[in-house]
Image (cartoon, helix red, strand yellow):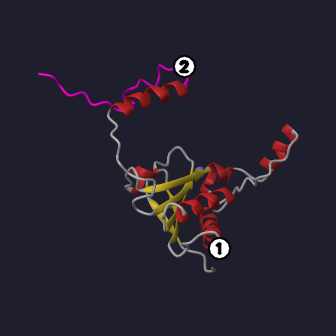
Amino acid sequence: MTEKVTHHPNDIDRATGDNVTDDLVAANRVYAQDFRDPGMDARPVRRVAIVACMDARLDLHAALGLDLGDCHTIRNAGGVVTDDIIRSLTISQRALGTRSVVLIHHTGCGLLNLTEDFRHELEMEVGQRPSWAVECFKDLDQDVRQSMVRVRTSPFLLHTDDVRGFVFDVTTGLLREVDPPAVP
Ligand SMILES: [Zn+2]
């Protein structure tokens, strides 16, 4: 009697590799063995775009009950709504049919410990001032509201009526909704 072997990317012994990227490529080989073409097109099934911090402790699909193909996930340091996030949201809505926007910041975010001095120190070190703002913040809720305002007031987006913001607690796994800004 043969036992069915289920392959899983985590079967790879992650401690043995010398190079993390090599380990990732090896894990992908295992992943692809059981992968079947899901037959989906590029339009997210649940018509939602999620803007979140890149934090390694935030597993968006698991935390929100999302499946492959359900949503766009757009991530950067802080989950800050920068011009490039607006670029992705604009494409998400206008070319790929999403209608709702969910913004997720989280407790213990690295940006809470930074100041705009980071930018100045970079300039002193490398001799070039970055063109981007660090977008650090001290108040999570206020920054979520600021992000909501940036989405809602963007002239490029088609859908700004369903924009909600949350803080994810990395110790409990729970989302807490942030009250929307009074204006707009
Ligand atoms: Zn973060």
Query: Which amino acid lies under the numbered mark 1 shown in the image of this protein?
Result: Thr
Q: State whether residue 133 appears in this view.
A: yes
Our reading of the magenta stretch's main secondary structure is loop
* Kind of element beneath mark 1: loop
List x then y, in percent, for residue 27: 43, 29
Decide which of 172, 104 is in the foreground and name it.
104
Q: Return the residue nearer the eye: 39 or 160.
A: 39
User: Image check: 154 left or right of 4?
Assistant: right
Q: Is residue 63 located in the magenta-colored stretch of the structure?
A: no
Residue marked by disc 1: 153
The residue shown at (61%, 51%) is: 76
Q: Nearer the viewer, residue 168 or 86?
A: 86
Q: Residue at x 50, y 60 (%)?
A: 96
Q: Which residues are magenta?
A: 1-19
Would you call the spot at circle 1 few (<14 residues within 10 Å), some (14-19), or many (20 or more)? Answer: few
Mark 2 neighbour density, 10 Å: few (under 14) some (14–19) many (20 or more): few
Distance between mark 2 and mark 1 Cα atoms: 47 Å
The structure residue drawn at horizontal position 80% and vertical position 48%, both measured from the top left corner, is: 130
| Quarter occupied by the C terminus | bottom right
Q: Position of residue 93 (x, y in %)?
A: 53, 65
Magenta-drawn stretch contains 11:
yes
Q: Which residue is mark 2?
A: 18
